[in-house]
């Protein structure tokens, strides 16, 4: 084998090792995640001022009125005190929770969210199970779609689990590491995105070493994780992975390729959804402003006509005054119209920015689809290899029997 292909093979082995490191991270984190998520739900339910065991299964996210009320900025203009652009508090017709449970939990979720303004994801959760299923509350902290049918850590991919730890500030109390700024959880999550975005399926030696070290650091967190047997077992496997004599089996390859393929497919679907939502939003904004622009023009026209009529019904002796006034008034109307258009133009430019952002997402989807094809072909290849191995083993057994 030539030197170049030797290096390529090594980088591919690194890539598989990187994928395995994430598999072990998940194995080490599943039980812990289930436990802390359960504790967090109990904490919230315990702090609600109601009869213990109260369960509400009547509320619907879209119709729930939160506890916080919106603020009035000017007549007919409201804002959410949490700074959310879309919030049920802005729609006065929403209904309160009959049992005063769901609105309380919703407020707790907003309070616990790491980002400002809070950005909980209401699409993965079933509000009617907030009182009974801990993960229905926790899933509000996963900023990606595709988790609505998941009920425990074992069913949630590592990216989803990392999201929950990053975004729910109450879970930080279970960790000794600093969760401020660009913390280790964020770095580990981003590295996984990079790993599974690689169309060469390669990873450098230093990168894979750093990847494994950071994952070990998470699992050896001294507060609670380091004392858990499954985390210790995962660390043992991760340390083996770092040894040069570590042998990558075809099964390992199949596992990692499957995971990479799943990741790329999910990411692509996710982006397609973002693009669809964006299109609807842009269309809505454009429609609203078109209506507004038409109204503005009509208003100015009507004012001009009214002005003219008023003046024309005046007495003859005021004609002189009129002659000087009308051009002045018309000038003012002109500036009014151009000011209004200036406002509309700035709104339109923000829509244009949104469209540009969406276009870049469209490009990303195309790239992901190309990577997915590469992964699929490779997956078919390693799966075939796995099949051949099984076949070969069976033949050996037959020969020696
Ligand atoms: Zn609000
Ligand atoms: Zn309710």
Image: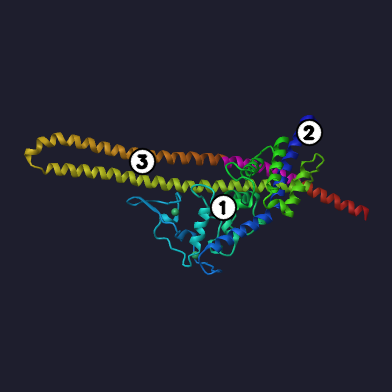
Would residue 74 appear left or right of 136 to someone viewing this image? left
Coloring scheme used:
rainbow
Q: Quadrant of the N terminus?
A: top right
Tag count:
3
Callout 2 secondary element = helix
Q: Earlier in the sequence, mark 2 or mark 3?
A: 2
Label the magenta part by its dominant secondary structure: helix
Give the magenta range: 364-382
Q: Which residue is mark 1?
A: 141
Q: CA distance from mark 1 to mark 2?
A: 43 Å
User: In the picture shown, does residue 207 fall above or below 224?
Assistant: above
Quarter holding residue 42: bottom right
Image point (40%, 60%), residue name? 93
Q: What x and y, as percent, mark residue 126?
A: 55, 60
Callout 3 secondary element = helix
Q: What x and y, as percent, mark residue 150?
A: 62, 58
**Outermost residue to the top:** 3
Q: What x and y, as percent, mark residue 26?
A: 69, 51
Examine the rendering and report whether any part of residue 168 can be seen.
Answer: no
Q: CA distance from mark 2 to mark 3?
A: 61 Å
Q: Which residue is mark 2?
A: 6
Of 112 and 250, which appears nearest the observer? 112
Quarter holding residue 8: top right
**Outermost residue to the right:** 400
Q: Which residue is mark 3?
A: 344
Would residue 315 appear left or right of 175 to someone viewing this image? left
């Amino acid at each position: 084998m030539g030197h170049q292909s030797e290096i390529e093979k090594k980088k591919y082995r690194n890539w598989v090792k990187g994928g395995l490191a994430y598999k072990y991270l998940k194995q080490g984190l599943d039980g812990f995640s289930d436990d802390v998520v359960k504790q967090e739900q109990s904490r919230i339910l315990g702090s609600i001022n109601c009869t213990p065991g109260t369960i509400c299964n009547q509320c619907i996210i879209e119709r729930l009125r939160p506890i916080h009320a919106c603020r009035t900025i000017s007549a007919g203009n409201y804002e959410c005190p949490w700074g959310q652009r879309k919030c049920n508090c802005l729609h006065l017709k929403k209904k309160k929770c009959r049992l005063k449970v769901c609105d309380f939990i919703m407020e707790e979720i907003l309070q616990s969210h790491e980002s400002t303004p809070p950005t909980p994801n209401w699409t993965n959760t079933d509000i009617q199970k907030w009182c009974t299923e801990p993960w229905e509350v926790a899933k509000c902290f996963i900023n990606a779609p595709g988790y609505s049918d998941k009920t425990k850590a074992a069913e949630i991919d590592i990216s989803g689990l990392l999201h929950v730890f990053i975004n729910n500030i109450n879970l930080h109390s279970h960790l000794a590491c600093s969760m401020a700024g660009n913390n280790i959880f964020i770095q580990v999550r981003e590295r996984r995105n990079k790993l599974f975005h690689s169309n060469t399926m390669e990873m450098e030696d230093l990168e894979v070493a750093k990847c494994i070290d950071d994952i070990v650091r998470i699992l050896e967190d001294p507060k609670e994780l380091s004392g858990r047997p499954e985390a210790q077992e995962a660390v043992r496997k991760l340390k083996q992975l770092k040894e040069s004599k570590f042998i990558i089996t075809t099964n390992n390859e199949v596992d990692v390729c499957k995971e990479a393929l799943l990741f790329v497919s999910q990411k692509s679907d996710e982006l397609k959804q973002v693009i669809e939502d964006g299109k609807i939003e842009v269309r809505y904004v454009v429609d609203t402003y078109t209506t507004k622009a038409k109204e503005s023009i009509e208003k100015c026209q009507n004012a001009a006509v009214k002005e003219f009529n008023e003046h024309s019904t005046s007495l003859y002796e005021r004609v002189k005054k009129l002659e000087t006034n009308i051009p002045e008034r018309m000038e003012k109307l002109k500036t009014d119209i151009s000011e209004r258009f200036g406002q509309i133009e700035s709104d339109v430019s923000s829509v244009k920015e949104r469209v540009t952002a969406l276009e870049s997402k469209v490009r990303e989807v195309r790239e992901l689809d190309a990577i997915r094809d590469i992964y699929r072909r490779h997956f078919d290849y390693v799966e075939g290899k796995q099949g051949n191995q099984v076949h070969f083993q069976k033949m050996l057994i037959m020969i020696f029997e």
